[in-house]
Amino acid sequence: MRPATAARGARTGHVVDEGPTMKRYILTGTPGAGKTTVLRLLARAGYAVVEEAATDVIARGQARGEREPWTDASFVDRVVALQREREREAGTRSEDVCFFDRSPICTHALSVYLDRPISAALSAELDRIAEAGTYRRRVFFLRNLGFCEPTAARRIDFAQSLEFERVHEESYRAFGYDLVDIPAATAHERVATILRTLRDSTD
């Protein structure tokens, strides 16, 4: 894959501070960084959570016989559609805080990493969440764990995962989000750091 600039298609400083009543926080980072484990612990602690869309799009595609769904031209738009569907569903819940495993900004980073143009659907979604202030400006960025174990939906090695991490960081910064580094640690320690940040934050 050729190196690409993560800021492609970004609208720097376009994040709106005034968001919806539910505070939507994003968990992001490279594949294999432990987001799913952290998300499950947050759910166990009583917080609303939303699972990652791309993993499920891949699983659904593979169940239909698609060996590598991410190579399909419609893959990114399918991820965008599922992310929006899940965001809407989350909006019907009564909790004050919701944690999202990735967001359309991650889908932007994915497009850049795959060296694909930013699709019209993704561009429209990026505009929508910026104008609506859908997600909180503060984003929890889970750093890599020093390794990356391949799975059916994650076929990259550790070196590639570090590049993916870099592209994600550039995309979030280009869109005006503030990253809270969550370094490698046990999942419980990382959850404690996230919740402590929320308690001490005015965001």
Image: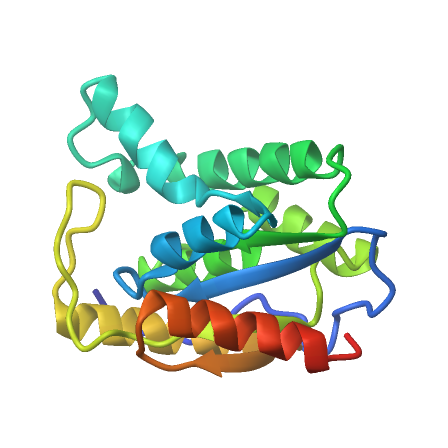
* Res 60 visible: yes
Instruction: Please provide percent x and percent y for residue 132.
Output: 81, 54
The quadrant in which residue 120 appears is: top right
Q: Residue at x 59, y 35 (%)?
A: 86
Asked whether the viewer can see residue 73, the reply is no
Query: Going by the image, does 153 lie left or right of 115?
Result: left
Residue sitting at 61 percent across and 50 percent down?
47
Residue 21 x %, y %: 85, 52
In front: 47, or 83? 47
Give the left or right position of residue 153, taking residue 17 as reference: left
Screen quadrant of the C terminus: bottom right
In the displayed image of the protein, which residue is found farthest to the top?
A: 64
Residue 65 sits above or below residue 3 on the image: above
Residue at 71% x, 65% y is 136
> 114 and 134: which one is in front?
134
Residue 108 at x, y percent in the picture: 49, 59
Kindly indicate the quadrant of the structure image that contains residue 11: bottom right
Kindly indicate the quadrant of the structure image that contains residue 175: bottom right
Residue 124 relative to residue 194: left or right? right
Q: In the image shown, does 45 or 36 lie closer to the viewer?
A: 45
Q: Nearer the viewer, residue 43 or 35?
A: 43
Q: Is residue 202 left or right of residue 77?
A: right
Q: Quadrant of the N terminus?
A: bottom left
